[in-house]
Image: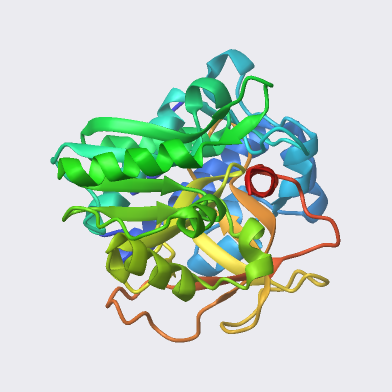
Amino acid sequence: MRFPYSEALSRVHDPCRWTRAKVALMVAACREFAAFHHRHSPELRRIYDRRGFAPSSIRTEADLGRIPMLGVSAMKSFLLTSLPHDRACLKLTSSGTRGQKTQIWFDRPSLDRVQRFLETLWTQEGLVSDQPTNYLMFVYDPKEAKDLGIAFSDTNQQRFAPVNRRFYAIRKAASGGWEFRKEATLACLKDFAAEGKPVRLFGIPSFMFEFMDFMKEPVRLPRGSWMMTGGGWKAAEDKKVTKGEFRAKVSRLLGLPPERVRDGYGMAEHSSPYCECRRHRFHVPVYNRVYARDPVTLETLPPGEPGLLELVSPFNAMMPNLAILTTDFGLIDPDPCPCGDASPTFTLTGRAGLVKHKGCAITAGEIVRRAS
């Protein structure tokens, strides 16, 4: 089982600078993955056949928007695979202690492809360093969270700078529930700052926001430090916090310039995360596609009009998640990014539906409220 186009696509340089050759590679990779999943996933084959869709019809960039989608809600209810279960080398879940859980599985070659393009993207953004670094993690301790997706992804990002020391702010209490250890986290932050090595802060922004409220005075971090948030802003919505206000607070209390405070977007159902550029835009790398769709007709919307986001990424052979329809609202930005990269960018505008899935960020909000 080989995917030559997907393999080549995962090795492209400057993924946020699209070229004709890179786009052609993306089209070919989507065609080979659509054909593979059509052969090996009975559920996706029924969807394709019912829509009269032939994987061989994927020939141009315009054809990528015709690939039938799999809804993330279906992935929360059913385990859909295209390879034998014993081929899975990594199994993750999308949610915390409550709510519907998506299982996302990877075989080894698929995981290697995902890791490869993540490293390429981080290198392009200047986020890879050889300096020993201290990590302050505002996520669940992976030793206790085990297969929780956000714990894995944040720990995985520690490979982009050598780990000197690390500290996890969220751990299990004696009662068995999750506990946000604010006092211990503040003591660790001061210790890291005094040590003088760069500090990288990762995690859920609601935890970080509440922690900064808890701080009594600023703690200036050493040169080379920066912050990456991810997992949603749900617990902070009642305080009307915008990303700009959040960055300003980080700059005031931790001394980090705005370009060193980045947000990430992703989900377990989609194997390719997105990282803000230095001008705080989510770029679409050439190995992904993002569409905004009308929530009623599912027609593709023009730039500037918000709709349900569809995400496309041809990398995971283990599961038929080539094209997924999310429950997130967003829009394709109509104007180019001032950072200079010409790839499309998108903006998140909210969540769809009357009832939200209680994922890890919702659970995080409950922990924050208990600790306040």
Q: What is the residue that sits farthest to the front in this orientation? A: 216
Q: Is residue 8 visible?
A: no
User: Residue at the location (63% across, 43% down)?
Assistant: 371
Closer to the camera in the image, 359 or 140: 140
Q: What is the residue that sits farthest to the right in this orientation? A: 354
Residue 278 point in image, percent of width and height? 30, 69
Total count of labels: 0
Residue 321 point in image, percent of width and height? 62, 43
Q: What is the residue that sits farthest to the top in this orientation? A: 86
Residue 105 point in image, percent of width and height? 58, 29
Residue 25 point in image, percent of width and height? 38, 54
User: Residue at the location (56% across, 61% down)?
Assistant: 64
User: Residue at the location (34% across, 38% down)?
Assistant: 188
Closer to the camera in the image, 165 or 126: 165
In which quarter of the view is residue 165 placed?
A: top left
In which quarter of the view is residue 215 placed?
A: bottom left
Task: Give above or below for 20 relative to 94.
Answer: below
| Residue 332 in the figure: left or right of residue 368 | left
Closer to the camera in the image, 266 or 221: 221
